[in-house]
């Protein structure tokens, strides 16, 4: 297999029925001169660690690990709204919705998909013009489409930037108590930071993707707001 740090704004592979666009799989195959198999996906505007298989046999093996829930993934997310508990789990079943979206299922609804996400609050910033902001670590125990995004919305703490399930498509400086409307963040505030699984040798394998520059700058902007006295943190 190979692991890559996927940048935001790039599709892994075009979805069924989606217009053909440049994708990460094709660019990697071209640059490496070999066929690669897609094992799992990240949303277009999510950054982070992503695996590709280099052989059909490894593709089957990795698919078995994912289907058997023997792959651990951790994400970093920044959310709007105050998450009261320092840690917990979200067990809302999900259901496909229109236009490729997902939604929380109603009790007993046919076609509902059991879904679970564990979370841990790392930091909170309160008193900002945009309202409270939380940095959390999210660990999905199932792999539903848009799971983390829908689960966070279901507890009234959507991603800081999420034009589909959230409240905004960007964050500007004035929302952190600074002057002007300079854009601080304009993509999903979600990063696939870590993945752990068993390699083909049987040895445990842990891979981390560093925080990309835009999210590092976003975190620094929050700390700057704290230094200016525009908020409190805990």
Image (tube, rainbow, N blue to C red):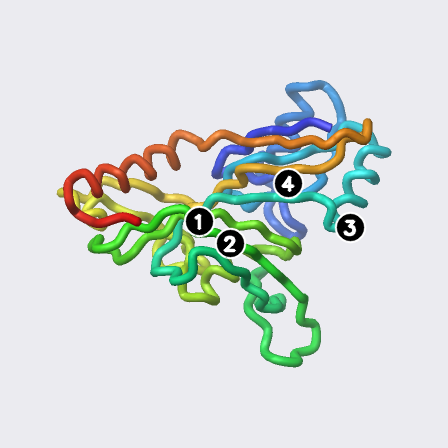
CA distance for labels 3 and 4: 23 Å
Foreground tag (4 vs 2): 2
SS for callout 1: strand
Which label sits on residue 13? Answer: 4
Q: Position of residue 191 (x, y in %)?
A: 49, 41
- Discs 1, 2 touching: Cβ within 8 Å: yes
- Discs 3, 4 touching: Cβ within 8 Å: no
Q: Position of residue 143 (x, y in %)?
A: 65, 53
Q: Position of residue 81 (x, y in %)?
A: 34, 60
Residue farthest along the right direction in this orientation: 57
CA distance for labels 4 and 2: 28 Å
CA distance for labels 4 and 1: 28 Å
SS for callout 2: strand
CA distance for labels 1 and 2: 7 Å
CA distance for labels 1 and 3: 26 Å
Query: Against 112, is 226 above or below?
Result: above
Q: Earlier in the sequence, mark 3 or mark 4?
A: 4
Q: Earlier in the sequence, mark 2 or mark 3?
A: 3
SS for callout 3: loop
Q: Residue at x 16, y 43 (%)?
A: 178
- Discs 4, 2 touching: Cβ within 8 Å: no
Q: Earlier in the sequence, mark 1 or mark 2?
A: 2
Answer with the quarter of the image where residue 93 lies.
bottom right
Which label sits on residue 68? Answer: 3
**Pointer 1 residue:** 136
Q: Residue at x 73, y 28 (%)?
A: 1
Q: Earlier in the sequence, mark 4 or mark 1?
A: 4
Q: Earlier in the sequence, mark 1 or mark 3?
A: 3
Q: Is residue 212 visible?
A: yes
Q: Position of residue 213 (x, y in %)?
A: 39, 30
Relative to 179, 122 lies left or right? right
**Pointer 2 residue:** 119
């Amino acid at each position: 297999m190979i692991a890559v740090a996927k940048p935001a704004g790039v599709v892994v592979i075009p979805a069924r029925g989606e217009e053909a666009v440049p994708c990460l799989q094709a660019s990697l195959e071209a640059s490496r001169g070999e066929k690669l198999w897609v094992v799992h996906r990240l949303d277009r505007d999510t950054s982070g660690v992503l695996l590709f298989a280099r052989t059909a046999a490894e593709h089957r093996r990795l698919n078995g690990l994912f289907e058997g829930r023997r792959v651990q993934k951790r994400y970093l997310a920044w959310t709007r709204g105050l998450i009261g508990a320092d840690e917990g789990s979200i067990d809302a079943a999900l259901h496909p919705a229109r236009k490729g979206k997902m939604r929380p299922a109603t009790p007993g609804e046919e076609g509902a998909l059991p879904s679970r996400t564990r979370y841990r609050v790392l930091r909170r910033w309160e008193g900002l013009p945009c309202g409270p902001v939380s940095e959390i670590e999210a660990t999905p125990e199932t792999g539903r489409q848009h799971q983390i995004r829908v689960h966070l919305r279901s507890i009234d703490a959507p991603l800081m930037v999420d034009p589909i399930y959230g409240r905004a498509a960007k964050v500007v400086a004035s929302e952190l108590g600074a002057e002007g409307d300079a854009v601080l963040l304009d993509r999903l505030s979600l990063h696939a930071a870590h993945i752990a699984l068993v390699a083909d040798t049987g040895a445990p394998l842990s891979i981390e993707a560093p925080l990309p520059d835009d999210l590092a700058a976003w975190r620094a902007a929050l700390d700057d707001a704290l230094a200016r006295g525009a908020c409190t943190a805990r």
